Image (cartoon, rainbow, N blue to C red):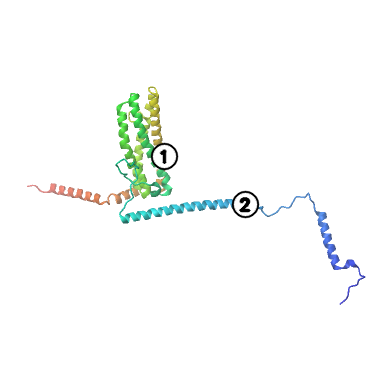
Amino acid sequence: MSTPNPFADPFRDPSVQNSATVLNDSSNRIDEFNPFAAPAASNQQPASNATPSRGVMSDELFRKQEELERKAEELRRREQELNRRGAENQNGTARPHNWPPLPTFIPIDPCFYQDIEVEIPAQFQSTVQLVYHAFLVYVLALFVNMVASLFYMIFASGGVGIFMLSVIELVIFSPCAFLFWFRPVYKAFRNDSSFNFMVFFFVLFIHCIFCFVQTLGFSSYAVGWVNTVETYSVSVPVALLMTVSAITFTTAFVGMILSLLKVHRLYRGGGFSMDKARQEFTNGVMADRNVQGAAAAAAGAALSQAASSAAPRF
């Protein structure tokens, strides 16, 4: 092994040459550095841009979770209601009637059980609520019409017939409206019944015509716009009360039309038809034992009468 020569050229030492190369590279970088040059674009996205996207995703997930929880709660509620109905059918007990909500001092019990949030599917509850509010506004219009007709008869030379007719309308039309067009649409959405839809459409359409006549007030049928305008020249306070009656009739008429249109839109999109309504009528009414017994009795009476008339006489 050869020993290094102490008198050789010191700059030829490899360690010295490596150090010199590093120093030359550093000096070249310093010479080439331009502090005024534009900084190079970085491919890394800033952290601030990623934060909003994560926030939006978390909000979307939170909304979806809330929607799923609402649907789960609705399914749980419907399942509990079905279980309660099954238990009531097995025990032979029915839910207590709660409509109309009469005061306790009146010795009359409610006639129907009604709970839109329990018996009506969630997607149809707003529609049934609309029809129910239209019914309530119409009952309010009948009551205001009775009061306005009373003042019109006393202070504005109105006829006695308009007041008597207003009382009859309040007593008869209020329960008829509930029984013949609100209750059918309630049962239609509850039981998925085409026949009840048909009853609702027919009765409410006829009732809309009567309500339109009441709103106009052409004759002594009701307090409407025409006889209200005529009363302003006789008594302004009475005319103002009659204006309230005309406004309530107008609101009720608009509510009926909106209810008719909205229910018809759902009816057309729900797969209901006249054939299905006819089939429900056949299976429901004609399959009833009382109806069958009455039909059999009528047929037997007709046959016996025909046989007696065809018997020879001596």
Q: Earlier in the sequence, mark 2 or mark 1?
A: 2
Q: Residue 6 appears at what percent x and percent y?
A: 91, 71
Q: Is residue 162 above or below residue 16?
A: above
Q: How far across and down, in percent of the image, does residue 192 sit?
A: 37, 49
Relative placement, left or right, of 10 versus 201 is right
- Residue 300, how many percent across, how many down? 18, 50
Q: Residues within 10 Å of mark 1 (few under 14, many from 20)?
A: some
Residue situated in front as seen by the camera: 299 or 211: 211
* Element type where label 1 sits in the image: helix
Residue placed at 41% from the left, 46% from the top?
Answer: 125
**Label 2 belongs to which residue?**
51
Query: Quarter holding the N terminus?
Result: bottom right
Q: Nearer the viewer, mark 2 or mark 1?
A: 2
In this rendered view, identify the residue nearer to me: 205 or 71: 71
| Residue at the image point whose x is 46% and y is 52% from the top | 71
Q: Residue at x 52, y 51 (%)?
A: 63
